Image (cartoon, helix red, strand yellow):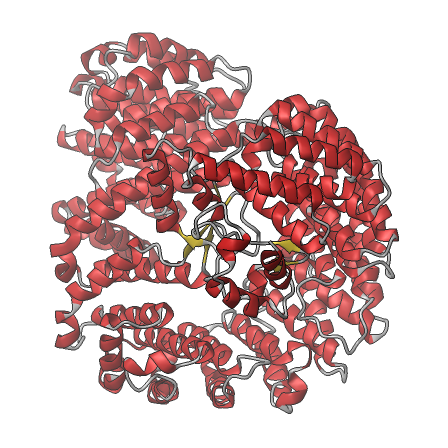
Amino acid sequence: MDKLREILVDLLNPEKAAAATARMKLASQFDAAYPIGPRSFRPPNGGCSSAKRYRTKGKTVFTPDYHVQFSTLRQEEQNAIRDHILQSLTTEENASVWSAVAEISAGILRKNNEWPAFFMIVQQACENQPAKGAELLARMSTSAPAVVREKTTQAKCLELIGACLNHSEPASLHQGLRAFSSILTELDESNQNAAKSLLQRSVGAVQSIAESGEGDWAAEGFEVFQSALDCPISLLNADALKDLSTWAAQVFGTADADAGLRCCAGNFLTQAVSSKSKFVKKKKMTQDLMHLCFPILMEDEEDEDDDEEDTPRSIALQLLDTISIKLPNTEVLGVIMEFATRASQGQAHQKRAALSALAVICEGCASPLIEGGHVEPLVTFAGDSLQSDNPALRGAALYALGQFAEQMVGAMTEFAPRVLQLVTGLLESCPDDLMKHSQLEKGLYCIEQLAETLDEDQIENLLPSLMSSMHRFMQMGNTDKCQVATLAVSALGVIIACAENVIGPHLNNCISMLQALLPKSAAATAEETPENIMLQASALDTLATLASAAGESFVPMAADSLSLAGQLVSAETDPDIRRAALNLSCSVVSLPNSPPQLLEAVPRILECLMETLKSTEGIGVKMIGDDENEIGSSAFDAVEDIDDDIEDGDDGEEIEHFTIENSYMEEKHTALSSIIRMAQKIPQHIAPSSSELYQESLVEAITKGIDTIGTDTDHGCALLIMAEISEVLDSYKKPIETSRILSTVRMAMMGELICMMDDDDDEDSGVKLEEEASEIEREILDGAGELLVAVAAVDPQGVITEGLADILPAAAALMKKPDSGSKACAIGILGDMFDTLGSNCAEGFVKQLLPVFMRFTSSEDDNIRNNSVYGVGVLIANSGETGIKMIPDALKSLPLNESKNLQVRDNVTGAIARMLYAGHAETRAAYSSQFLARLPLTEDHTEWRMTLEVIEKLLTEGNQEVLGRLQELAGHCLNSVNNLNPDITADKKTILKIGQFMSQLSNADPNMFAELKKSSPEKVWNKIVKVNTKAN
C-alpha cells in the first residue's frame, strides 16, 4: 500500500506526474500493493503522458474508464476494492492520497450506484470532518449525477450541504458549494424550496471564502449562481434575481477584489441578462448594469494588453455587448452616448474605454446609430484616436472602426476610403510597435470589414494600394505574437471578392503572391507546423475566391496550383488543407474552361465531399461526470460504447454535450457550398451521383430538421428550419417525409412545440409577457402555414389523405381562441392550403367552412377580415359545382363597397377573380363589368395572378370590354413587378404568371407587346426573365 500511496502522491504533483505515470505502467509491485484485483483495474491509467490529465485546479482527475473496468470485475473483487476504499477514506491521513481515493470512489459510483456503506461514510464525514465530507459530496455529485438525481437522495445531499455551509472553514464551504452547483443541474421540483434556501446562504459562503484569501476557491464557488440560472427548476424570480445581481455587481465593481472572483461575478451578470432579460427589464436594471461597466473599462493600465479573455475589462465588454443585444436599444444607446461624449474629452484611457464600449454595442444598436446621425462623429472620433501616440487607444480605435464597418452596413461607405488611408498608413509603422495591443491583427480585421463597404469605383481606385499592403504583410510571415501572413491572406480574399469585376489587371500578381505560400507537394504538408498549415489552407481558399471572381482567365495562369489541389484532394493531408483544396477544385471545375483532368476527377471530388459530410472526425463527446478539461472522446466511439452497454443490459454512460472543432464545421460548410456551386454550374457532371446525394442528404437533413423543430427551445431555430425545409421541397419538387412534416404542422397549430411552451414561471410577469408569447405563436403559425403549402405543392394527395383529418380540427381550435392573431392565422393557413391543393379539394368541406369564413369578413380586425375574404374566394374556386352554386351568397358577404382601405379592396377583387375563374361562362359574363371596374390593383399586387387568369378566360370568350382595356391592364401589372419580391412564394408565382401572360400577348399582338416593352423599365423585364429562367 505504501508504494501505491507514493505513486498517487507523485501523480498529484505536476512536476512528478510524468515520471509517476511511467512508473505506474511498469510497476510490478502494483499487485502486491493492491492485491485484490487484476492489473486491469488501475485508477490512474498509465497510458497518459500529461500531468494536466491528473491534476486540474486542485481537483484530482483520472482517466475516464476505470469505473468501466471496475464493472468487469467479479463481485468478490468489487467488494474487496470497495472495502479497501472505505478503509482508506476513514483512515488515510495524506491529503493528496485521500483525494485520489475519493475521486476513485466517486468514479465507481457512475455505473455502480448501489453502495450504502459509502453513503454512510459521506454522512459521517459531513458531521465530523465537514471539509472531507463536502469533498466527497462534491466529487460524487460531479462524477455520478445519477446518484443525486433520485429525489430522496438529493434531498439528503442538500441537507448535508447545508450542514457543511454552517462551518466557517473555507475548505468546507468551497466543497459544499461545488456539490451544490453539481446538484442544481439535476434538481428535482420537490427540492426546490431547499435549493432556494441554500442559494441565499451561498452568498455568505462565497464572501467568507473570499475574505479568507482563497480567491480561486471563491471564484469556483461563485459558479453556483450561474448553475442556478441554468437550473431546470426556476430558483430565481425577478426580485431574487435583482438582489443577487446587486450583490454580484458590488463584487464585480470592487477594483481591489480578486480578479478571478470579479470575472465570475461579471459572467453571472452577463448570463443573467442573456437568460433572464425579461426580469432585467422589469426591475429596470439596465442603466445600473451599464454604469457599472464604465469604471471597469478604465481600470487597466495603459501598458497592459487586452488579449486576455478573462479580465474584468473583457467581461465588462461582454456584458455591454449582451445588454445591447438582449435589451431594448432605446434603453441602451442614450446611456452609452452620454458616457462616450464625456469620455472622448478625457485622457487616453477614457477615450479607449469609450471606443471599446461603442464597438461592442454596435451590433445591437446599429440601426439607431445610423438613424440618429451618429456615424460621422463616431468615425471622426475613432479616426482621431488612430493618430494618438498611445498604442492601447490606437488598438481600440482599429477594432471600433472594424465593428462600425461590419455592423453598420452601408453607412460606412462614404467614409471608408479616408479611413482605409489612415489604417494602412498606421500599419506601415514598425511591426514591433504594432504588436502592442494587437494593433496589426485589429488593423487587418478593420481593412477586411472596410473593404466590404466599398462601392465598385472606390475599390477600383484603392485596389493597387491595398494589394501592395497585403503583399507586404504576407511577406512578414507568421510569428508567435501574431499570424500576420494568415490574416493578410484572409483580408486579401475579402478584397478579391469585393473587387470581382475589376480584379483582372491584378490577377497574375495575386496568383503569384498566393502560390508562393503553398506547399511544394502533398507529401510536404506532413512536415508543416500548425501555423503554416493554417496559412496554406487560407491561401488555397483565397485562390478559390480568385477563381470565382476572375472566371475563365484564372485557369491558364494557375496551372501549378490546380495540379497541387488535385493531389491534395486525394492525399492523406490535414483536414484544413484537404477542405481548402476541395474548395479550389470545386471552384475551377465549375468554370467553362476547366482542365479536362479536373473534370475527370469530379466523381472523386464528389466522393470526397460526401465523405466530408458524413465524417464524425472533429466531434468529441463529454460524458456526464467527466472533468471539464478532459478531451472529448470520439463521437462515433462514444455512441458505439453506449450501444454496446444497452445491448448488454447496462444503462450505459450519459452524454452531457458534444464538442465540435471549428475547422470541422468549416470543412462541412465548404463541402456543402461546393456541391451547390457544382450543381448550379456543371449539373451534367454530377447527375450520375444526384440520386445518392438526394437520398443521403435531403432525406436525412429534413428528418433531423423535423426532430429539431419539435425539441428545440428556440423558436427562431424552429422558424429557420421550417423555412429551409419549405425551400428544399420547392426546389426538389418531390415528396419527402410528408407524414412527419404534416405532424409537425399539426403540433405547431396545437401549440405543442417545445419552443411555444412558456417556461417563465414568474407569477407576476403580467399581460405584456402573454402578448409576447402570442407574437411568437403567430410567427410559428406563419412558418407552419408556409411549410404546409410547400408540402401540398409537391404531394397534394398525401396532404389530403394524411393531413386534412388533423389540420382541420387544429384550425377549428385556433379559430375558437380569443386572440385575433390565432383566428387570422388559422383562416390564412386553410386558405393557402386549399389554394395550393387546387382542383375540387374543398368540395367536401365548403358547406361547413364557407359560413364561418363569411362571418369573419365583417371582422374589425384587418388580418382576420383580409384572410377571410381571401379564404371565401379560395373555397368557392376549389369546391366544384357545389361552390359555383354558392357564388351569389359568397359575393354578398364581401365588403364590395370598401374604398378607403385599398388592401381590402384588392383582396375583394382577388376573391371575385377566384370565383369567376371557377364559374361558368355565363357567370363571368354577368359579373365581368363589376370585376373590371375594380381594376387596376393598387395595394395587394399578388392578386394579379388570379386576375390575369380571369382576363385570359374573358379574352377567350370574346369579352370586348376586357379587350378594349387590355393594353392598359397589361401596363399596370408590369408596373406591379417592382413591388413583388421573388424570394416570397406568392410573389414569385405572380411574377411567373405575368411572364406567361406577356409571352402569350407577344404572340397574339406583337405591336401591343412592343409598345409595352418600350414603355416599361428594363429592370422589370430583367426581373421577369430572371424568375422564369430560375423556375425552368
In the picture shown, does residue 220 fall above or below 259?
above
Q: What residue do we see at 60% from left, 70% from top? A: 402
The reply, left or right, for residue 914 in relation to residue 597 is right
In the picture shown, does residue 456 fall above or below 64?
below
User: Is residue 838 in view from this perspective?
Assistant: no
Report x, y in % for residue 866.
44, 25
The reply, left or right, for residue 629 in relation to residue 890 is right
Q: Residue 131 or 523: which is nearer the viewer?
A: 131
- The total number of labels drawn is 0
Q: Residue 207 or 733: which is nearer the viewer?
A: 207
User: Is residue 93 in view from this perspective?
Assistant: yes
The reply, left or right, for residue 323 in relation to residue 302 is left
Report x, y in % for residue 912.
32, 23
Report x, y in % for residue 184.
65, 35
Q: What residue do we see at 76% from left, 75% from top? A: 304
Q: Residue 479 or 766: which is nearer the viewer?
A: 479
Q: Quadrant of residue 798?
A: top left
Report x, y in % for residue 788.
33, 30
Q: What residue do we see at 48% from left, 72% from top? A: 455
Q: Quadrant of residue 718?
A: top left
Q: What residue do we see at 64% from left, 41% from top? A: 87
In the picture shown, does residue 485 fall above or below 120?
below
The reply, left or right, for residue 593 in relation to residue 167 is left
Q: Residue 487 or 394: which is nearer the viewer?
A: 487
